[in-house]
Amino acid sequence: MTYAPYATMPDRSRGRQVPEEESSFRSPYQRDRDRIIHASAFRRLKHKTQVFVEHEGDNYRTRLTHSIEVGQVARTIAGALGLNQELTEAVALAHDLGHTPFGHTGEDALHALMAPYGGFDHNAQAIRIVTSLERHYADFDGLNLTWETLEAIAKHNGPVVGDLPWALAECNAAVDLELHTHASAEAQVAALADDIAYNNHDLHDGLRAGLFTDADIMDLPVIGAAYHAVDSRYPGLDARRRRHEALRRVFGVMVSDVIDGARRRLAASGARSVEDVRSLGAPVVVFSDALWADLKDIRAFLFTRMYRAPSVMRKRAEVSKVVEALFPYFLNHPEEMPARWQGDIAAAAGETALARIVSDYIAGMTDRFALQEHRRLFPAEAAAAAEVDLRAGE
């Protein structure tokens, strides 16, 4: 494959924390991607919330399907820019590994509970998973990913400065990820692919859930023009196909905007290596100012009509109580955690270390397992919550 000069070259990797003999038929970043796909944490994303709690419907995105969509978008953009597609895809697939059950609602609840012990951050938790918590290999804990993949997971949203989340600080103490700089262009592509994917599929899911209608979004920038283009080309198209055709055009606008802008910025930057990209002092893969302004209007609409919709807020309150009940219970009864956690618990030096193990356990739960554990441990509370939920649906 021919790479642009500013791409991350597979034969110039800084290597892995634990040296390994590299594959004769896979690049280092293909190998990283494959390890991420085979990780237990990746499989569990199948039953973790994107916006709607996992059991609310089979047609909504989960954290796993979101990650797959991000990977597809990221690979497309990376290919168009001459970047390393394998590294970009690996980062895209790993970016949400650290998410708790119940999405950002679960994260907010766990962060509040962990405040006395250093807090909780899902990006830092992803690093903790790939460097420590996945324990399948004979020679090391974690996945022993390349430096470039670790750097990209840690910094795909930009430099990390100031007080570091404790999980990221632990990793960075062992492997200097140069957190003060911007990451590779591949990492930046993964970050924008995340934005593109959720901006697109949250519209799909909100419409499917009946939180708003096609008519409600016709006045939004980009979206209205896409619907009008479909109506002009396909008059009388049935509602479901019309919606799909319009939203895929919105999707195309976002992807094209990122590719066209990144090409111009990379050319103007004079970057001739991945190190040049890291040292530019600003990201090169971003939305144009005009599209970013339009997307802010779309996000404001989604915030009001979807993320803060009464039905969504009721569910948020319900699942927050699940996390708020499970954390102190396992902190006070760590012997109730599965056998594979008992070695770490026995070695824990103090309450903070124990709390972080409990946090790891709860963060790794799927939606359904967290709800099952809550019903098992707090049957009266779970029954009361189910009754309230039933009445809300009447």
Image (tube, rainbow, N blue to C red):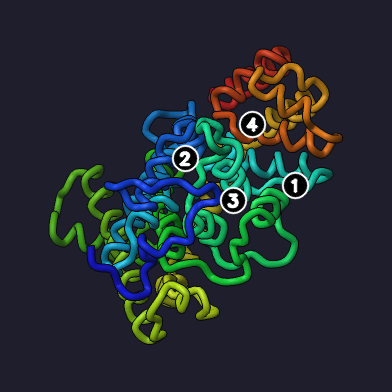
Q: Amino acid at mark 3?
A: Asn
User: Which disc, if any, is residue 63?
Assistant: 2
Q: Are marks 3 and 4 in contact (CB under 8 Å)?
A: no
Q: Amino acid at mark 2?
A: Arg
Q: Is residue 133 left or right of residue 62?
A: right
Q: Marks 2 and 3, Cα distance to the nearest angstrom?
A: 14 Å
Q: Position of residue 249 (x, y in %)?
A: 26, 59
Q: Residue at x 26, y 48 (%)?
A: 244
Camera-nearest label, 1 or 2:
1
Asked if residue 332 is positioned above or below residue 363 in the image, the reply reads: above
Q: Which residue is mark 4?
A: 319
**Among the two numbered marks 1 and 4 on one chain, the one whose residue lies closer to the N terminus:** 1
Q: Marks 2 and 4, Cα distance to the nearest angstrom?
A: 16 Å
Q: Marks 3 and 4, Cα distance to the nearest angstrom?
A: 21 Å
Q: Residue at x 40, y 39 (%)?
A: 37
Q: Is residue 159 left or right of residue 92?
A: right
Instruction: Identify the element where label 3 is drawn.
Output: helix
Q: Which residue is mark 1?
A: 119
Tell me the quarter of the image containing the N terminus: bottom left
Q: Residues within 10 Å of mark 4 (few under 14, many from 20)?
A: many
Q: Are marks 2 and 4 in contact (CB under 8 Å)?
A: no
Asked if residue 338 is positioned above or below residue 288 in the image, the reply reads: above
Q: Which residue is mark 3?
A: 123
Q: Amino acid at mark 4?
A: Val
Q: Which of the 4 image quadrants contains residue 372?
A: top right
Q: Residue at x 40, y 76 (%)?
A: 273
